[in-house]
């Protein structure tokens, strides 16, 4: 059994970790709020405002973004065989995501996490980019902080560009999002990832970041 002193130290460490998590969540919330507040585009999710939710069971207060209602995500469509969309819809979604992404880039923002889960379909079936919590201005991107070891903070490994996985690049550019969009486009057209399902994250890192893996195009 742990001594009272060890238990106290463990409790303090846990509390510090929780405070760090809360700080990170607040930073991501504020970042997404500021990003969405200055962005208005037909293919980027609309922000209506913010609100505070009081959780009765915990007594905690949570800040929430109030955004337009979406029917589902693009990931929902791709993973549901009963929702097979015609090629015309797939091409429309790809074009709409490209349009929204181009607008973000024109405003000096890199999204950093383009993937089907972060594309929603509105009530009319049109695609909109969401989740700008890790988006960053191109002027302040720091390569040293954007590496594979902390990829959970800046993107999703299977959609990350090779240079971002490797780290240590001189400058982060819009090409990070363009690569992710290419993976998304492949999934929209093929209904599957260009990476084999059996790949673990270390295998993906070795194949994509170190060996420059590219799927075969028939």
Image (spheres, rainbow, N blue to C red):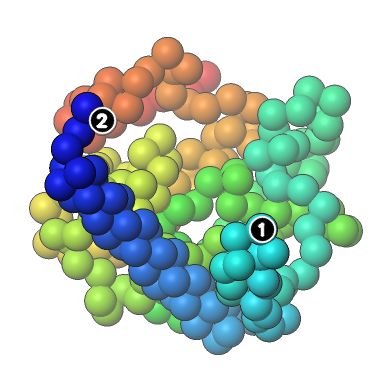
| Residue at the spot of label 1 | 57
Q: Is residue 91 left or right of residue 33?
A: right
How far is mark 2 from mark 1, CA to CA? 42 Å
Task: Return the x and y of residue 109 as percentages of the image width and height.
Answer: 42, 73
Q: Quadrant of residue 70?
A: bottom right
Q: Residue at x 36, y 57 (%)?
A: 18
Q: Residue at x 50, y 82 (%)?
A: 34
Q: Is residue 178 visible?
A: no
Determine which of the numbered discs, if any, sits on residue 112 in the image: none
Q: Is residue 208 visible?
A: yes
Residue at the front extreme of this rendering:
4
Q: Residue at x 44, y 71 (%)?
A: 26
Task: Return the x and y of residue 167 as percentages of the image width and height.
Answer: 16, 49
Helix, strand or loop at label 1? It is: loop
Task: Give whichever of discs 2 and 1 has the lower sequence position.
Answer: 1
Task: Return the x and y of residue 93 as percentages of the image width and height.
Answer: 70, 51
Q: Quadrant of residue 135?
A: bottom left
- Mark 2 surroundings: few (<14), some (14-19) or many (≥20) residues within 10 A: many
Residue at the top extreme of this rendering:
198
Task: Return the x and y of residue 64 as percentages of the image width and height.
Answer: 63, 71
Helix, strand or loop at label 2? It is: helix
Residue at the bottom extreme of this rendering:
38
| Residue at the spot of label 2 | 205
Q: Residue at x 25, y 25 (%)?
A: 202
């Amino acid at each position: 059994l742990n001594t009272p002193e060890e238990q106290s130290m463990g409790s303090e460490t846990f509390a510090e970790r929780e405070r760090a998590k809360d700080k990170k969540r607040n930073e991501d919330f504020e970042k997404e709020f500021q990003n969405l507040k200055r962005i208005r585009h037909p293919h980027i999710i609309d922000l209506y405002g913010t609100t505070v939710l009081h959780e009765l069971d915990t007594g905690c207060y949570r800040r929430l973004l109030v955004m337009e209602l979406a029917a589902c995500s693009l990931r929902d469509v791709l993973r549901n065989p009963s929702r097979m969309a015609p090629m015309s819809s797939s091409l429309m979604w790809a074009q709409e995501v490209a349009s929204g992404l181009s607008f973000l880039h024109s405003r000096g923002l890199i999204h950093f996490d383009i993937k089907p889960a972060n594309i929603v379909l509105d009530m009319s079936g049109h695609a909109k980019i969401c989740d700008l919590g890790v988006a960053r201005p191109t002027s302040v991107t720091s390569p040293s902080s954007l590496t594979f070891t902390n990829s959970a903070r800046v993107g999703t490994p299977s959609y990350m560009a090779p240079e971002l996985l490797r780290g240590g690049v001189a400058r982060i550019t819009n090409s990070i999002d363009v690569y992710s969009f290419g993976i998304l486009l492949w999934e929209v057209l093929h209904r599957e990832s260009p990476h084999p399902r059996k790949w673990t994250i270390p295998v993906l890192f070795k194949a994509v970041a170190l060996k420059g893996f590219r799927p075969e195009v028939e």
